[in-house]
Amino acid sequence: MIDVLYFAWVRERIGLPRERLETGAATVADLVEELKAREERYAAAFADVSALRVALDQELSDFSAPLLGVREVAFFPPMTGG
């Protein structure tokens, strides 16, 4: 099982702040493809992954990263400074 967290507009589009999933995905990109295939709201949220960042177990990562041993995946838009 893996915890998937959604932040900002990703959460708004999906309608959930987090969920626990059983997945066979090997990488973050594979997980995104699984999610996009679930429902239209996921497809909309992940339509442009270049507009997203991902953290694995609270460490910034990338979409090619393996999920083996990962307990938490978080998706969020890039942060802007000010």
Image (tube, rainbow, N blue to C red):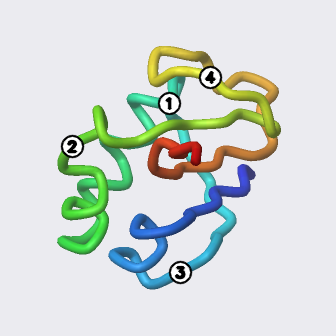
Task: Give the image location of residue 11, x and y in percent.
Answer: 48, 73
Q: Label 4: how many residues lie within 10 Å, few (<14), some (14-19) or many (20+)?
A: some
- Seen from the viewer's position, the closer of residues 16 and 10 is 10
Marks 3/2: CA–CA distance: 19 Å
Mark found first going from the N terminus, 2 or 1: 1
Q: Secondary structure at mark 3?
A: loop
Q: Identify which residue is drawn at 50% across, 68% down.
A: 8
Q: Identify which residue is drawn at 29% across, 32% down.
A: 50
Contact (CB < 8 A) between labels 3 and 2? no
Contact (CB < 8 A) between labels 1 and 4? yes
Contact (CB < 8 A) between labels 4 and 2? no
* Mark 1 lies on residue: 28
Q: Specify the amino acid type for callout 4.
A: Ser
* Mark 2 lies on residue: 48
* Mark 3 lies on residue: 16
Mark found first going from the N terminus, 3 or 4: 3
Mark found first going from the N terminus, 4 or 2: 2
Q: Secondary structure at mark 1?
A: helix
Q: Secondary structure at mark 2?
A: loop
Disc number lying in front (1 or 4): 4
Q: Specify the amino acid type for callout 1.
A: Val
Looking at the picture, does residue 35 appear above or below residue 58? below
- Seen from the viewer's position, the closer of residues 26 and 13 is 13
Q: Label 3: how many residues lie within 10 Å, few (<14), some (14-19) or many (20+)?
A: few
